[in-house]
Amino acid sequence: MTKKKSALGVLSNQKYIVILVVIALYIFFFAASVDFRKYTTMVTLLDYSYYYVLMAIGVSFPLITGGVDLSIGTGMVCYALVGGYLVHNVGLPVWVGMIVAILFGCVIGLLNGVLVAIMNLPPFLATLCTCMITRGLGSLLSFKNAIPWPTAKQPGGWFHSIFKITMAGNTKIPIGFLWMILLVVIMAFVLKHTKFGRYTIAIGSNKEATLLSGINVKFYHIMAYVICGLFAGLAAIPYASAIPTIQPGTGAGMELDAIGGAIVGGVSATGGSGSIEGTFFGVYVICLLKVGLPFIGLQANWQQVITGLILIGAVMIDIVKKRRAVTAAA
């Protein structure tokens, strides 16, 4: 009886359901397409998943507070444009461009936090405004020019080896996946075992009660958005590594895949609960659909439809869980 309850508990946890979905999708695409089985396809999948993983880790924190950040997609492109401009046009070292991209992300995250926590603007509206601001700033600060970062073989191209190293025979090893796992472990610890993480969850669960308990809600609320901006800045680095030339005015819509991955992974759409490891696997559901569906003859429109249906399912699961929790408490 105990083992049965334990098994049911695992299957009722959205995090474990998503892991099973990732495995099932991989097996399905692996069996359905010979081209999907190629090693180069897996490397491409991982290359292009890194920036989604980083954005999703960051946006999990505003989501858990009951908010959202719609600026992470255009923001990431903006930070990559600014960092790349400093490297390509000004001639600064690559590490300077990387640091500037990360710091710029933190500044926009701070702005979002102030607008939401201090000015009391609705998160959707506040971050929609900064979404438009970062989209325009990227174009202005790069003088409306497409910006290339150094390729792997050019001077300064060492930053590509953070995510992928080339072995003998031109075999590429995607070591960036290890960095993603490390960051997931660190941020999962932060969310579950630190004061900041506990207060982030408390704000999303009951902001008024958290405030009455003497916690500096505004500070921790702002910090949730700063963390989100930090990870959007970090995401600019693998984005610059994966995309040969950064185009101004792009990035809109990418935030939806990151937010969708977090929600699919079990982050509550209404705040108060979620896990970073669940977010990690949720992103790979989205990425597998993006990469795998064309291999079976379905184009991007189908990916959007299927992703939308999966998101509806994830939200419904969240609603059912919350209703059961209220019923059990009563």
Image (tube, helix red, strand yellow):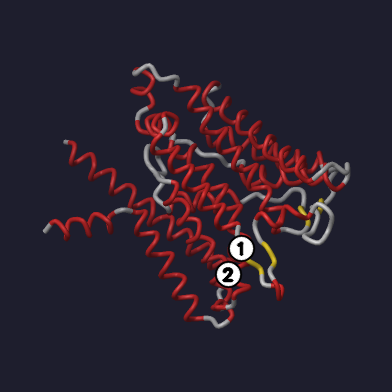
Residue closest to the eye, 191 or 246 = 191
Q: At which x and y percent is residue 212? A: 35, 17
Q: Which is nearer the eye, 126 or 32?
A: 32
Across and down, in percent, residue 180 comes to 54, 52
Per the model, the C-alpha gap separating discs 2 and 1 is 9 Å
Q: Secondary structure at mark 2?
A: helix
- Quarter of the image holding residue 192? top left
Q: Is residue 61 left or right of residue 10?
A: right
Residue 80 at what x, y percent from top left?
73, 46
Amino acid type of the residue that numbered disc 2 sits on in the rendered structure: Met
Circle 2 residue: 42
Residue at the (75%, 40%) spot, across then down: 136
- For the residue marked with disc 1, what is the amino acid? Pro
Please state the horizontal and vertical placement of residue 13, each as a whole percent of the image.
Answer: 31, 53
Q: Pick the quarter of the image with the N terminus.
A: bottom left
Question: Which residue corresponds to mark 1?
Answer: 174
Looking at the picture, tell me which residue is in the foreground, 255 or 316: 255
Q: Is residue 120 left or right of residue 104?
A: left
User: Quarter holding the C terminus?
Assistant: top left
Which residue occupies 37% across, 54% down?
15
Left or right: where does residue 183 sit relative to residue 157? Answer: left
Determine whether the residue tagged by mark 1 lies in a helix, strand or loop: loop
| C-beta proximity under 8 Å, tags 2 and 1 | yes
The quadrant in which residue 295 appears is: bottom right
Of tags 2 and 1, the one toward the viewer is 1
Relative to 190, is 236 above or below?
below
Q: Is residue 303 above or below residue 66?
A: below
